[in-house]
Every structure is written in C-alpha cells, then in structure tokens.
Image (cartoon, grey):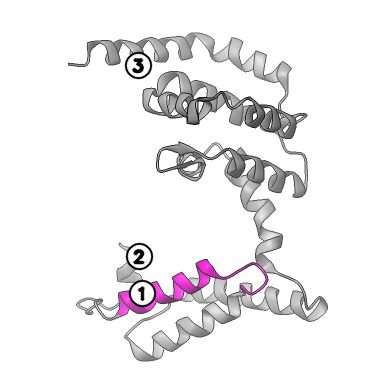
Amino acid sequence: ISSASVFLSPGTDVRPIVPALESIWQDARTASLSSFNFRTVTAAFNELVYQYPIRIPERFSLVIRSLLTQEGICMTLKPEFRFLEVAYPYVAKRLLTDRDARLRERLIQVLFKQGKFQWTRLENLVELAQEGAGELDLTDTVSDGAQLLITDETLRTQLILALTEDDRLHVDEVARLLRVLQGGVKVDRLAQTATTDGPAFLRKMALSWSESVLRP
C-alpha cells in the first residue's frame, strides 16, 4: 500500500494537492531553527485537510498530537525552546552509528552533494552527535566506511577527488576531521573486527575488483 493511498481516497485528483504540499514543505525547509515549530506546519497542513479530501490515519494523528503536546509543554516551560535544536544531536548520532542499510545509504547521500564530498558537513554531524546523550562510538561506522571505499569504485573515486580538489591536497580538512573523531573510534575493536571479518571481506573485495577488470 502506497503512502498516498493511506492519506487519499482512491481516484483522488492529486494535481492541485501536490503544489500545496510542496509549498508547506518548502516553507518548513527554509525556516531557521529559531522560527521552525511543528504547530505552524500542522496548522498549514490542517488547512489542506479542509480544502481537499485528505484523511489522516489514526496512528499518524496520534504521532502528530504527541509531537505538538511535547513541543507545547517544552515551550511553556522554556519559551526559547526549539524542538529541532534538541532533535538534531539524536538524528546526527543515529545517522552516523546505525548500521541499517537504508541509514548508511542516507548518510552517503548527506555527505556527498553533486558527487562532491562535504568535509564541513561531516564535521558538523560528528560535533552534533557528540552533543547528544551517551558515548559516541564511531568504530563500526569507520569499519563500514573503509570496506565500502575499497569495494565501491565510484565512492572511492569521489573521495580521491575530494582529497585532491582544486589541485591541492586537503590535509587541513583531514586533520580537522581526525581531531573531531578523536576518542570516538576504538582502535582495538577496529583491529578485532578487521581480524574477524578479514577473510570474508577479502573475498568480497576480490570479487568487486575482478568484476571491474572484466567489465567490458
């Protein structure tokens, strides 16, 4: 079942609805941290509910109410409270540490913009994640990244280009990144992972390289 069929009755003409939704999301995306809040977005969406045959499933309605209630309580106790400022560290940590394939793919999309590696974006992500609760352990992330770089030719090429962009070696960017990562990578566990997963990884690497060599 598609997400559209959950919110719209079968046969609904979506042509007038799409521009209206795009306008809401565009306003939300361009809003600054200091001005964004869920109440504003929800109010704008509610107007569409009355204008078009949009139905909100109960489970989504409960999530929206929960967010609005939490935001309202927090803003009552602390008027300068901003939901996104609190959520960003959690989102950054989840994006960096969760080994789910979809989140790993999303992380790559975040770090590469138009084929270019975003050094500052990675630094900001790590710094945001460090602000969150609990220890930030990036050992698995570094391990997965190293394996991906060796087996993914496209990604490897993009990173090499990032390191040599503008006809210079980006040593300063690498040094800053290493400083930010300091303490977040457990070298002993990284070595243990390499020893344990080494044989399987070498087979995968050999297959990847052989495919690139044999590719017509």
Taking 202 as reference, is 17 above or below it?
Answer: below
* Residue marked by disc 3: 208
Q: Residue furthest bottom?
A: 50
Q: Is residue 198 magenta?
A: no
Q: Are marks 3 and 1 in contact (CB under 8 Å)?
A: no
Q: Is residue 32 magenta?
A: yes
Q: Are marks 1 and 2 in contact (CB under 8 Å)?
A: yes
Q: Residue furthest left?
A: 216
The part of the image, by quadrant, that contains residue 153 is top left
Disc assigned to residue 126: none
Residue shown at the point (41%, 24%) measured from the top left:
157
Residue 192, how many percent across, how many down? 66, 14
Disc assigned to residue 3: 2
Taking 112 as reference, is 211 above or below it?
Answer: above
Q: Are marks 3 and 2 in contact (CB under 8 Å)?
A: no
Question: Does residue 210 appear left or right of residue 41 in this picture?
Answer: left
Majority secondary structure of magenta residues: helix
Q: Earlier in the sequence, mark 3 or mark 2?
A: 2
C-alpha separation, residue under disc 3 versus residue under disc 2:
36 Å
Magenta-tinted stretch = 17-36
Q: Secondary structure at mark 1?
A: helix
Q: Secondary structure at mark 3?
A: helix
Quadrant of the image for the N terminus?
A: bottom left
Question: Does residue 204 appear left or right of residue 63 in this picture?
Answer: left
Q: Secondary structure at mark 2?
A: helix
